[in-house]
Amino acid sequence: MLAQYLEIKSEHPDALLLFRMGDFYETFFEDAQTLAEVAGVTLTSRDAKSAHPVPLAGVPYHALDTYLARLIEAGLTVAICEQVEDPATAKGLVRREVVEVISPGTATAPELLSGNSGRYCLAYVPREGGWDGWALLDASTGDFRCGAENVSLESLCQRHPVREVIVAEDTSPERVQAWRTALPDVVVNQANAAWYHPGFARQTLTDHFATASLSAFGLEEANREPACTAAGAILRYLATLGKRRPEQVTTLRFSARGDRLVLDEETLRNLEIFRSFRGDRGPGTLVHHVDATLTAMGRRLLEMRLAEAMTDLDELDAWHGGVAACLAARTWRDDLRDRLRRVGDIDRLAARAANGRIGPSALRQFGATLAAVDGIRGRAAAEGAPAGPVVAWAADLPDFAALAADILATIPDDAPAHVRKPGFIAAGVDAELDRFRAVSADSKGFLAGLQGREREATGIPTLKVGFNKVFGYYFEVTKKHVDKVPDHYEQKQTLVNACRYVTGELKEAESTILEAEEAATRLETALFEALIGRVTARLADLNLAARLVAGVDLMLAFATLAERHGYCRPHCDESLELVVKGGRHPVVEQLLTSDFIPNDTVLGHDDNQVLLLTGPNMGGKSTYLRQVALITLLAQAGSFVPARSARIGVVDRIFTRVGASDNLARGESTFYMEMSETAHILHQMTGRSLVILDEIGRGTSTYDGLSLAWAITEFLSDRDGPRPRSVFATHYHELTDLEGDLPGLVNLQLEVKEWEGRIIFLHSVGRGRSDKSYGIHVARLAGLPEGVLRRAQTILDSLDSADRRDHDARVAGPRGASLAADAGSRGPRAQLSLFNESERDALDALKGLDLESISPMDAFMWLARIKRELSD
C-alpha cells in the first residue's frame, strides 16, 4: 500500500495528497506533518516500533470539506485520491486514482468560497517591450476574461479578487519570489511551460469552444496574442487539475484596452476601493458603502464596475437613464428587489451542476432560484414598469418555469445535502422507485412482526432484531436467555453480554430488503443524474440569466443607493471638464455622526486645469482629493453620485499619489516610493486623465521637495503636454505664487476660523491660498506636552519671520523665475537661529554692509545706530 501511495505522490509532488483508505483520507511523511499543523489533527506514525516510523495523519471522509477548506485557505494545493474499485470485489490491492486536484484559485465547493465576491485564478504572461497578457477564470462561476495591456501583476491582483496566480515554470526564480513577496495574500504557482506556447494555447481554446477560429472572442488580432496565450494556459490548468472538461466555462470575454476606465494598484489602494488601509474589506471601503445589491451576481458586477468603469457615452447614458427610471418607480422597484432576495447564486449553482458536484438540497435551492427568476421576468414587464434597461433585460431572461417545476417536483423539501443518504427523490416521481420503497417498508414491517412472533415462540422477552454492515440482519439474545435459543438458530457472533443469530426466514427477509434498497438507490441516483442533465443542457441559458439578473440587481441597487443618500444623476460627455456642485465623499459622509460639508469642484482642460489646494492639517484636504476621484469613478460605474449636480467629461485613467509608506520588502524608502509612483503618473497620463496628488516632496529636504513639487506642477500645466485635470494638495505655500504664471492653475484653500484662541476647521473649499498649516494646533489636539508646544511656537515665529523676508525678496524679482536657480543662489539653509527679530535685523544689515565703500566715520556711526536699536 505504501508503495502505491509513493507512486501516486510522485505524480503530484507539489500537492498535499489525501489518500483514501476506508472511511479516512490518510497522509504520510511530510504531508502528514503539514496536515497535522494546518488542519489541527493528530500526528501519529505507522510502524511506530520500527527504527524509521512513517509519520501518519488522517481525516474522516465525511468531514473532508471542513478540512479541505482549512488547507486551501492556507494556500495549499490538495490532490484527492479515491478508491476506484469496490474493496469487496478487488483482487489484491484496491486500485486508487487521483480524481481531482484543488488549488486556492480553482476551488468550487461552497465551503471553500467566502461571500459573494469572485475567486479568480490569474494567468500572467509578461512580455518585454510589448503588451502583457492576462486571463482571469473563476472556476466557481465560469467567468472567463482576458486582456493585453502594459500592466503589472500587482495591479491586476489589486483590481480583481485574485486568489492564485500561475506563470510559466521557466519564469526566473528571482521574479517569482519577488511576486510572492509583493503579493503575500496571493498564491503564486508555476505551470507547464508548454501550455504557454501560443500555438498550444490557441488549440486549447478552439478545442474547448469547438470553433475553427477565435474571432468570436476578439482574439484574432496579432497584438492580442499574449491574451490568447494566457487564456489557453489557464483553461488547460483548470482542466488538468479538475481531471475533466470545465463545462461551466461557456464563453470568453476580451477586455479591449481603452474600453474601460483603468485604475492602477496605487489608485485602488489609495482610494480604498476594495480594501481599507487596515487591510480588511469591511467598513471604510468604497465597495462596502455603495453596495445595495441583493444577489451574488449583482455584487460581483459591482466589484467589476468599480475596478473597470465604463467610458462609452452611450453605455453610460443608458445606465444613468435606467437608474433614473428605477428611482422614480419605487413600488415597482421594491417589488422586484423583494423577488431578487429569493435568487441564489446562479453562476455557482450552475457550475456545481456542470461539474457533477451539486447535492440534492442545493439542487432544490437551484429550482427555487429559477422559479424566482421566472417571477422577475413576469413582474418586470407588468403594469407600472418604467421604460428602460431593466425591463429589456428581464424580457430577455430565458423561460425556466418548466425546469423549475421539474426540480421542485423531483427533489423534496427535506432533501439531504449528499446523495450518500437515500430519500432525495420525492414520492410519486417514479412508480418503480415507489414500488421498491414499498417493498423495503413492507419487509421492515414484516421484521417488526417477526421479532414479536419469535419472542412469543421462544419465550425470550429481550430478543430483538438488529442490523450491521458486516453481518446484516440478526436476532440478538442476552446471555441470560441463551439456553432458550431454538436449534434452528445459527449463531453468527458472540459479544460480552449477548449472542447474535440468524435464521432462514430472517435471511430471506434481509435479501428482500437489501435488494429493494439497492435497487431504490440505483434508481434514485439515475433519476438525480438525469435531472442534473436537464439542468446542464440549459447552461448557456443559465449563464445568460446570471448576467441579466446581475444587471437588474445592480441597476436597482444604484437607484436604492441614490434614494437613501440623496445622490444625483451625473451628466457624462466628451468634454474635458469636471464640474461638481455640492460634492460629498461617499464613504466619509456615511461614517460621520455629524453633517458632511459639501464642496464644489470645477476642473477643465484650459481654465481650472490644475487646482492647487492648501490648508491646515486636519482641514480635509485628503478627503476632498479622494472625493473628486470617487465621484468620478461612481459616475462612470453607472451610479448616481453624492452631489447636488455633476457634469463629468469622461475620464480614461484616474491616478492618485496619496499618503506615504515605505516598502521595506523591496528596499524602497518612502521618498523613493513617492517619486516612483509620481513618475508612473507623469509617463502614463493623458489629456483625459484625472490626476490626484497629495503632498509631493515631503520625504526629502525642504528645498529638494519644493523644487520637485514646483517642477511637477509646471509639467502638469505645460501647454505642450497632455494637461490632465489635476488636483494637487500641498504644504509648500510657495507654490501658490504660480497662480497667474502657469496656465490654468487656480489656488484653492480649506477654510478655517480663528476664534478666542481656538481654530475651527470649516472643511469648506474656497478660492485663495492658505499661509498656515496650524500644525501646532493639531499637535495640541494630539496631546503633545505643553512645554514642547511652547518651544515649537517660538521656533515657528522665528522661521516665519525669516520666511517672510525671503518671500519678499523672491517675489520682487521676475515672476515665474526658475525655482532651482533661486534656491541655488541662496545656498544651503543655515541651522535655525534663535535670535529675536531685532537681532536678526541687525545681522541682516551687517551682512548687507559694503566694507569696500564705507568710510571709517560712516562705519562708526552705523555701528552706533545698530547698538541703539538693539538696546531699545
Image (cartoon, rainbow, N blue to C red):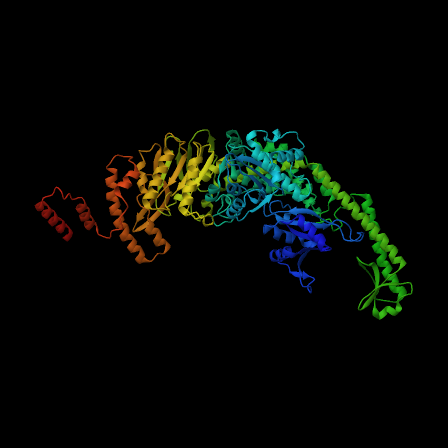
The single residue placed furthest to the bottom in the displayed view is: 480
Residue that protrudes farthest toward the left in the picture: 857
How far across and how far down the image is residue 748, in percent? Answer: 35, 39
Percent of width and height locating residue 217: 60, 31
Q: Position of residue 657 (x, y in %)?
A: 42, 42
Residue 336 visible? The answer is: yes
Residue sitting nearer the eye, 626 or 670: 670
- The quadrant holding residue 605 is top left
Give the left or right position of residue 401, taking residue 622 as reference.
Answer: right
Residue 849 in the image: state x and y as whole percent: 16, 44
Observer-nearest of 872 and 466: 872
> 99 or 740: nearer the eye?
99
Q: How many marks?
A: 0
Left/right placement of residue 91 relative to residue 162 reads: right
Q: Quadrant of residue 543?
A: top right
Indicate left or right for 470 with 166 as reference. right
* Image position of 661 with respect to 383: above or below: below
The quarter of the rendered structure image containing the N terminus is bottom right
Farthest residue toward the front?
51
Q: Is residue 583 visible?
A: no
